[in-house]
């Protein structure tokens, strides 16, 4: 036996969670909205190290926790799912009458951690690390300029609007 001090278990109020730098530097995290970040913090707070896959949080409860209406909460859940931070373990079912055994909120999986429920896995999927933002369409640099006096019926680029030695043909400089 060790003669050192015995470690006490921490009280539930002394719990904490880590936010790793590699997660904070990911493209997916940088693209999250403030509502998505607040929701993710609430989900991580509900994770106790043994319940990943059975983290219960409904939209109504989330709205109360992050102090907003239901519209940003729905968008935050959708955004976290699309970016790969969370997955649905079991979809909530509210078709039952109150206090019926089947009435449950959606159960969530945090992809940052290995799944604990229903079957324990050893590896976290970390799907958010593979997420990339959509590329925005940009106009080609060779797109010709159109004079405001032209209408859609006229030719888009006529001979007088072509570039000659860096100056438009109709410029009188």
Image (spheres, rainbow, N blue to C red):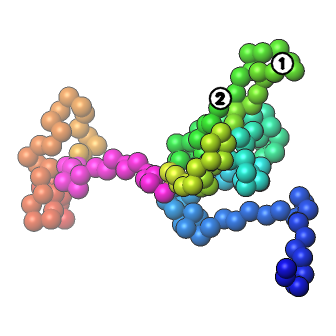
Percent coordinates x, y for residue 31 in the rendering: 54, 55
Instruction: Describe residue 46's horizontal placement relative to residue 121 as left or right.
Output: right
Q: Please tell me in which quadrant of the rendered image residue 8 appears.
A: bottom right
Disc 2, SS: loop
Percent coordinates x, y for residue 113 in the rendering: 62, 55
Q: Is residue 48 above or below residue 71?
A: below
Whether 32 is among the magenta residues is no
Which residue appears at 66% of the width and 65% of the height?
19
Q: Is residue 95 above or below residue 27?
A: above
Q: Earlier in the sequence, mark 1 or mark 2?
A: 2
Q: Please tell me in which quadrant of the rendered image residue 93 appears.
A: top right
Q: Which residue is mark 2?
A: 91
Residue 75 seen in the current view: no
Q: Number of callouts in the render?
A: 2
Instruction: Describe residue 96's horizontal placement relative to residue 132 as left or right.
Output: right
The 10 Å Cα crowd at callout 1, few under 14, some 14 to 19, many 20 or more, is: few
Majority secondary structure in the magenta region: loop
Q: Quadrant of the C terminus?
A: bottom left
Which residue appears at 73% of the width and 51% of the height?
50
Check residue 118 in the rendering and tell me which mark sits there, or answer none.
Answer: none
**Residue extent of the magenta highlight:** 129-145
Q: Which residue is mark 1?
A: 100
Percent coordinates x, y for residue 46 in the rendering: 77, 49
Q: CA distance from mark 1 to mark 2?
A: 16 Å
Which residue appears at 78% of the width and 15% of the height?
96
Asked if disc 1 and disc 2 are in contact, CB closer than 8 Å, the reply is no
Q: Nearer the viewer, residue 155 or 16?
A: 16
Which residue appears at 78% of the width and 33% of the height?
60
Disc 1, SS: loop
């Amino acid at each position: 036996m060790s003669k050192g001090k015995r470690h006490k278990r921490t009280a539930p109020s002394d719990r904490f969670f880590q936010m790793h730098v590699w997660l904070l530097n990911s493209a997916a995290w940088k693209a999250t909205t403030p509502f998505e970040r607040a929701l993710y913090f609430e989900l991580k707070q509900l994770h106790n190290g043994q319940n990943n896959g059975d983290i219960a949080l409904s939209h109504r409860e989330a709205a109360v926790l992050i102090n907003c209406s239901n519209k940003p909460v729905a968008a935050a859940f959708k955004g976290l799912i699309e970016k790969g931070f969370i997955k649905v373990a079991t979809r909530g079912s509210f078709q039952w009458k109150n206090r019926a055994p089947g009435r449950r909120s959606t159960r969530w999986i945090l992809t940052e951690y290995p799944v604990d429920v229903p079957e324990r896995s050893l590896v976290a999927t970390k799907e958010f690390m593979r997420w990339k933002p959509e590329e925005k369409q940009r106009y080609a640099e060779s797109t010709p300029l159109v004079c405001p006096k032209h209408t859609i019926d006229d030719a888009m680029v006529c001979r007088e609007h072509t570039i000659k030695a860096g100056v438009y043909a109709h410029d009188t400089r």
